[in-house]
Image (cartoon, helix red, strand yellow):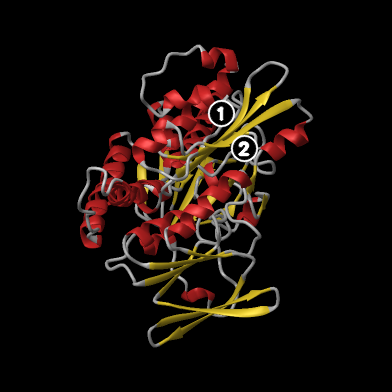
């Protein structure tokens, strides 16, 4: 027997959750499914548990920097305690979310999905028909298609390690590799990052990245660039990883190896062809209303959609509101992306919003660049940090901020001020006449302009 809904959502992350709850609140019949526990990557396997774990490493890092300056003992990290604390956040989410769905009258399913036709799904053993189907399945680790690639663990595995290996290797030089490498190194492990490109974190400003690369190597992490991993072998004491650098083979022996080579959209098992849903390796093809370009019954949001939005949780939530509005009111709300700050939660933290210097050059705008390392500023000296730098890009014609790129203490907060300034088109003069609380990290902003 076929069950029918006004809206059926595939995926219970932040985008799917937003759409399901909002549509149900307006009286539509809604169903939702996820083959994994409810909550999505951010709450269960990404941002939130990662940030909980980072908290302990921040304490150790701060104490280490102030040793001899008021601190005598550097605390040790207890990995088991960290993981137990992290789990208190993770365990409470799925039942809490499902309870909320049921309170809102949303029918819940726990099964994988395949499309049958334009408006019909096979959800586990059940057949579902819906007027509107939303794909909000997020992303998952890239498949490593070389010999032994399946032996690599994932970011989810790292966040659930009961015991931290003595030595780890991360394949890929993106934010996942760097964040987890910093966690592991500060927790006492020997860590290697192997990246195939000339520089890591390629979507960030190269000058600011160079400061993070220095800080990472100073932490003791072995950063290996221009090296393509070609093979993983299981050996007695762990794994042997082979990589090619300019034709030469390098080998690394570690207890654990992690796949941090990227996260493509989790859409390729849905049999989208059966529903005439066009897609690419970047996600489902959507129009300005986040509706499938080839099947008007289908919408997509978050990492599952091919859009201009960054693969960030707040962006997924915003897209969720756009999709739910268009389902409820007809296609009347176009997706419009504000400045999207993005952060690498290493220590020091690296953050970015707006145009990079390269993007500004390609735009044809007249601009000026302020770039400086400011480890002699008061905030750097009081925290005893060695890496504190900024690059701001200013429009010469109207004096507005085009982009800001930061590395240093608490720049994950400072970057939000720059995001607000870019969105509201505050000028440099507007920002310079602001009175910020002092001494705070925000009070440094006016000197970056």
Residue 378 x, y percent position in the rendering: 40, 31
Characterize the local packing of mark 1: few (<14), some (14-19) or many (20 or more) Cα atoms within 10 angstroms: some
Q: Which residue is drawn at the image coordinates 36% and 21% (left, top)?
A: 438
Query: Circle 1 is placed at which residue position?
Result: 326
As measured in the structure, the alpha-carbon distance from the residue carrying label 2 to the one carrying label 1 is: 9 Å
Look at the numbered disc 2 and give the secondary structure of its residue.
loop
- Is residue 117 placed above or below 252 in the rendered structure? above
Residue name at image x 65 percent, y 43 percent: 295
Residue farthest along the bottom direction in this orientation: 236
Residue 436 image-quadrant placement: top left
Q: Are marks 2 and 1 in contact (CB under 8 Å)?
A: yes
- Which residue, given by chain and number where applicable, does mark 2 sit on? 291
Q: Picture coordinates of residue 214 (x, y %)?
A: 51, 54
Quarter location, residue 430: top right
Q: Residue at x 70, y 78 (%)?
A: 247
Reading the chain from its start, which is encountered first: label 2 or label 1?
2
Q: Position of residue 361 (x, y in %)?
A: 75, 35
Residue 413 tag number: none
Depth check, front residue: 4 or 344? 344
Residue 111 visible in this rendered orientation of the protein: no
Label 2 Cα crowd, 10 Å radius (few <14 / some 14-19 / many 20+): many
* Frontmost residue, 300 versus 317: 317
Q: Nearer the viewer, residue 9 or 407?
A: 407
Q: Secondary structure at mark 1?
A: helix
Quadrant location, the C terminus = top right
Q: Is residue 63 above or below residue 299?
A: below
Residues 340 and 319: in front is 340
Image location (x, y in percent) of residue 157? 38, 64
**Apparent side of residue 380 relative to residue 252 in the rendered image (left or right):** left
Count how many numbered circles sit on residues in the image.
2
Left or right of 43 in this view: 303: right
């Amino acid at each position: 027997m076929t069950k029918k809904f006004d809206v059926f959502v595939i995926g219970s992350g932040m985008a799917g959750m937003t759409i399901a709850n909002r549509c149900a609140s307006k009286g539509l019949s809604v169903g939702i499914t996820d083959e994994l526990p409810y909550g999505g990557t951010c709450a269960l396997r990404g941002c939130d548990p990662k940030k909980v774990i980072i908290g302990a490493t921040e304490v150790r890092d701060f104490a280490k920097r102030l040793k001899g300056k008021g601190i005598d003992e550097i605390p040790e990290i207890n990995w088991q305690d960290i993981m137990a604390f992290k789990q208190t956040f993770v365990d409470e989410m799925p039942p809490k979310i499902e309870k909320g769905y049921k309170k809102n009258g949303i029918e819940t399913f726990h099964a994988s999905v395949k499309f049958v036709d334009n408006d019909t799904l096979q959800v586990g053993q059940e057949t579902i028909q819906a007027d509107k189907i939303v794909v909000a399945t997020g992303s998952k680790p890239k498949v490593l298609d070389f010999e032994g690639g399946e032996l690599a663990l994932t970011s989810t595995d790292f966040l659930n390690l009961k015991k931290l290996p003595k030595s780890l290797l991360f394949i890929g030089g993106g934010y996942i590799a760097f964040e987890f490498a910093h966690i592991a190194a500060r927790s006492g492990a020997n860590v290697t990052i192997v990246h195939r490109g000339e520089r890591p974190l390629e979507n960030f400003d190269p000058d600011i990245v160079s400061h993070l690369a220095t800080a990472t190597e100073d932490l003791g992490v072995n950063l290996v660039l221009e090296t393509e991993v070609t093979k993983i072998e299981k050996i007695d004491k762990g794994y042997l990883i082979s990589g090619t650098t300019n034709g030469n083979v390098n080998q690394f022996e570690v207890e654990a190896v992690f796949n941090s080579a990227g996260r493509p959209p989790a859409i390729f098992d849905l049999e989208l062809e059966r529903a005439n849903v066009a897609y690419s390796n970047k996600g489902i093809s959507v129009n300005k209303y986040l509706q499938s370009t080839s099947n008007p019954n289908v919408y997509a949001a978050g990492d599952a959609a091919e859009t201009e939005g960054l693969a960030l949780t707040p962006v997924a939530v915003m897209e969720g509101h756009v999709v739910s509005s268009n389902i409820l009111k007809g296609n009347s709300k176009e997706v419009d992306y504000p400045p999207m700050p993005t952060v690498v939660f290493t220590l020091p933290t690296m953050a970015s919003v707006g145009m990079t210097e390269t993007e500004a050059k390609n735009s044809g705008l007249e601009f000026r660049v302020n770039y400086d390392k400011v480890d002699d500023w008061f905030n750097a000296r009081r925290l005893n940090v060695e890496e504190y730098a900024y690059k701001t890009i200013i429009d010469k014609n109207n004096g507005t901020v085009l982009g800001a790129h930061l590395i240093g203490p608490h720049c994950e907060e400072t970057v939000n001020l720059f995001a607000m300034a870019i969105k509201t088109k505050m000028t440099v003069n507007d920002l310079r006449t602001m009175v910020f609380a002092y001494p705070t990290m925000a009070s440094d902003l006016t000197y970056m302009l």
